[in-house]
């Protein structure tokens, strides 16, 4: 495997193999599988789970990691092309990224959406520019428009819980958040659930429709797998017979890069905070999923997060397991 960037790059059978390998590595650890291998971790955006789960995954397989982020005492990094570097930044990513990559056998890169230009972010322009600078295998640890490790972990979580793939209904719902958040997780989630063969409903208020490029990609996946993808602002019909409520927040594409304009349409949406009444029409054991971090009392109540519906900790642990599988396939010589 030369890169792990998008579930769409793999066939459904390959993804199922990765999940089976994740399960096998959990049951029968291979503490020497990646002995002597090094994973470089470049975090241009913050993290808790991704950082630690990759470190833990490498240690459990016998390898090692090093982490680079702008918060460390590195030289300020410049990313603009053609810039005269007479400001604060002393090093350009064009040198820094290949140097970092050269110290490892593979590199994981995290670079969130800049949220200035929608088309650039939908095209994952910055991430593509970064990966073009490395000649080792690379892993997308969340880019402007994708979070494949999260999605693979979520797929495994649903398998673990016995949530049906074909015919199982998943609602991906927008919730209120004080800041306009990127499309990476909703885009990856709607695509993953469609690829898994689920009937996916995107639930969001007017103004927070997912961009066509995201919905079209998910619909293509659904056409392949026998799933379906619809979109609505009607909570009670969306939740009818749902097996999973997957929650996230994302920016308004209509006001992309303009927080003030988005703020004007948001005050009336504070009730988009998940509580038990959201589940009235769902199946009785409908699960609550979220990639974390999540704001308590803003996106979801304590009662749901601390209650039996929530599987957020399982999702987080599965990050480590599926990443072990990805690293094993990428770096193991056997
Ligand atoms: N879900 C996830 O990627 O978490 P972090 O942002 O903490 O890495």
Image (tube, rainbow, N blue to C red):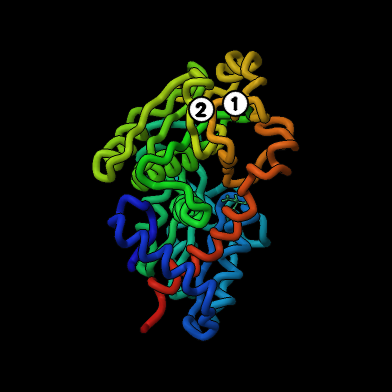
Q: Name the residue under label 1.
A: 280
Return the residue found at the far left. Answer: 224
Q: Is residue 321 above or below residue 314?
A: below
Q: Is ligand 1 closer than 8 angstroms to the Cβ of mark 2?
A: no
Asked if the residue at tag 2 contacts the one at tag 1, i.e. Cβ–Cβ closer than 8 Å, the answer is yes
Q: Is residue 201 above or below residue 159?
A: above
- Quadrant containing the N terminus in the rendered view: bottom left
**Residue 19: % across, % down:** 43, 63
How far apart marks 1 and 2 lie (CA) works out to 8 Å
Q: Nearer the viewer, residue 52 or 281?
A: 281
Question: Judging from the image, what secondary structure is the residue with disc 2 in?
Answer: helix
- Describe residue 112's horizontal placement relative to residue 227 as left or right: right
Q: Name the residue under label 2.
A: 239
**Residue 101: % across, % down:** 45, 68
- Quadrant containing the C terminus in the rendered view: bottom left
Q: Which residue appears at 67% of the width and 60% of the height?
A: 72
Number of other residues with Cα within 10 Å of mark 1, as a class: few under 14, some 14 to 19, many 20 or more: few
Q: Is residue 4 above or below residue 303?
A: below
Dot 1 or dot 2: first in sequence order is: 2
Q: Which of 282 and 172 is in front in this view?
A: 282
């Amino acid at each position: 495997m030369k890169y792990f960037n998008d579930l769409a790059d793999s066939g459904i059978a390959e993804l199922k193999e990765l999940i089976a390998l994740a399960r096998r590595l959990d049951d029968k650890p291979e503490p020497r599988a990646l002995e002597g291998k090094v994973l470089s971790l470049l975090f241009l955006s913050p993290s808790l789970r991704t950082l630690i789960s990759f470190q833990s995954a490498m240690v459990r397989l016998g390898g090692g990691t090093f982490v680079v982020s702008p918060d460390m005492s590195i030289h300020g990094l410049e990313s603009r092309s053609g810039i005269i570097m007479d400001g604060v930044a002393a090093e350009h990513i064009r040198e820094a990224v290949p140097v970092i990559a050269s110290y490892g056998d593979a590199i994981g890169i995290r670079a969130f959406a800049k949220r200035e230009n929608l088309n650039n972010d939908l095209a994952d322009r910055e991430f593509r520019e970064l990966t073009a600078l490395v000649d080792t295998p690379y892993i997308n640890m969340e880019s402007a428009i994708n979070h494949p490790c999260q999605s693979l972990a979520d797929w495994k979580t649903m398998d673990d819980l016995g949530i049906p793939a074909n015919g199982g209904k998943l609602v991906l719902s927008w919730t209120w958040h004080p800041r306009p958040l990127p499309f990476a997780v909703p885009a990856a989630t709607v695509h993953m659930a469609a690829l898994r063969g689920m009937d996916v409903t995107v639930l969001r208020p007017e103004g927070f429709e997912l961009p066509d490029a995201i919905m079209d990609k998910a619909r293509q996946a659904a056409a392949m797998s026998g799933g379906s993808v619809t979109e609505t602002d009607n909570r009670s019909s969306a939740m009818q017979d749902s097996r999973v409520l997957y929650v996230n927040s994302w920016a308004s594409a209509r006001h992309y890069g303009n927080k003030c304009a988005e703020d004007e349409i948001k005050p009336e949406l504070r009730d988009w905070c998940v509580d038990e009444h959201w589940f009235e029409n769902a199946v009785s054991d409908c699960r609550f999923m979220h990639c974390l971090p999540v704001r308590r009392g803003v996106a979801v109540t304590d009662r749901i997060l601390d209650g039996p519906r929530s599987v957020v900790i399982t999702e987080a642990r599965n990050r480590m397991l599926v990443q072990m599988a990805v690293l094993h396939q990428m770096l193991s010589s056997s």
